[in-house]
Image (cartoon, rainbow, N blue to C red):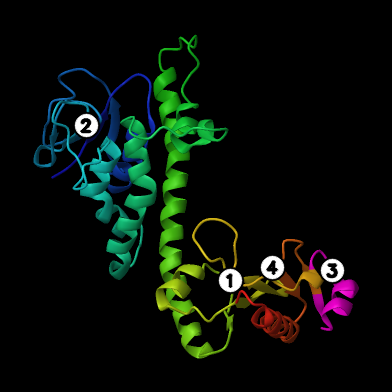
Amino acid sequence: MTIDYLVTHSGGFHADELLSSVILTRLYPAAQIKRSRAPEWITPADCRIIYDVGGAYDAGRQIFDHHQRGAPLRDDGQPYSSFGLVWKHFGEDYLVASGIPAADVASVHAAFDADFVLPIDLTDNGALSPTGPLADLTLPVLLETLKPVFDDRTPDADDRAFHAALAIARSFVEARIAKHAAKLRAETIVQTAIRAAGDNRVLELPMGMPFRPAIVRAGADHLLFVVHPRDTDWCLTTIRRGDEGFETRADLPAAWAGLTNADLERASGVAGASFCHNGRFVAAARTREAALAMAEIAVREALAAPSV
């Protein structure tokens, strides 16, 4: 079946149909986006996919709206927007087309749905209303900021703005999916490093990467610090206790806080120590040996403290 048209509504735009368009244009690059509310366009046909307009949800007829009575809900009762519906039916194909390894497609699909698609769905349906000073900096609001101002009467102003916003929306989708895929690659590397570390309290990695999820999943509660190369030096990093907040399993020594170079070398007794953040959650050294030496000192101090 050839898809010639991707049909969504005309006028102002929102995040859900923009992000739906990101998915669909990747899968049907030759199709033309048609923004219209005319009955002849929003009526299902074999050559088109209709989304966020049309008053129906019927995947078999390729129409994905959520504004009608009896609109579709997720299994847990939370509402879909058009983005959620499009992701449900086309997301895995999009990931395959994006080069995600087949073994990772299901995991990336679920993760992206949970942390990117669902918030868009909830916000579009009014089930989630961010508040506070960052409320106007959420992705849906920022994308809608790209709509023309009220007195721009240029005939194609809405369409031009839509396509400009589409390029920006695409960059966010691609970047987030790339990060999810990278986390899975990192998990394999971290799991291997955990096995190599054994009972050691310091985990050495071959490069900087997301490490906490793999550490938690492995149940490696004994680990306190991570060491890895970084550009021309080496990094010594703490491990946060939770997904949110900044509490760590163990802090770097208080005597190192805010010191650099010779001052830090004197305080730590390690030649090559070059930096310690004042918050004591990250430090740097000029060599691997210096970073590991700093890590061992940090471990000894942490184990001597009553809280570890």
Residue 163 percent location from the top left of the image = 42, 31
Mark 1 nearby-residue class (10 Å; few <14, some 14–19, many ≥20) = some
Residue at the spot of label 2: 66
Residue at the spot of label 1: 249
8 versus 25 height, above or below: above
Question: Which of the 4 quarters of the picture holds residue 284?
Answer: bottom right
Q: Secondary structure at mark 1?
A: loop
Mark 2 or mark 3: whose residue is earlier in sequence: 2
Is 272 magenta? The answer is yes
Which of discs 1 and 3 lies nearer the camera? The answer is 1
Mark 4 nearby-residue class (10 Å; few <14, some 14–19, many ≥20) = many
Residue at the spot of label 4: 282
The span shown in magenta is: 257-273
How much space separates mark 1 and mark 2, taking CA atoms? 45 Å
Closer to us: 67 or 98: 67
Q: Secondary structure at mark 4?
A: strand
**In the image, 87: left or right of 231?**
left
Question: Which of the 4 quarters of the picture holds residue 205?
Answer: bottom right
Residue at the spot of label 3: 260
Mark 1 or mark 3: whose residue is earlier in sequence: 1
How much space separates mark 2 and mark 3, taking CA atoms? 57 Å
Examine the rendering and report whether any part of residue 175 can be seen: yes
Mark 4 or mark 2: whose residue is earlier in sequence: 2
Which of discs 4 and 2 lies nearer the camera? The answer is 4
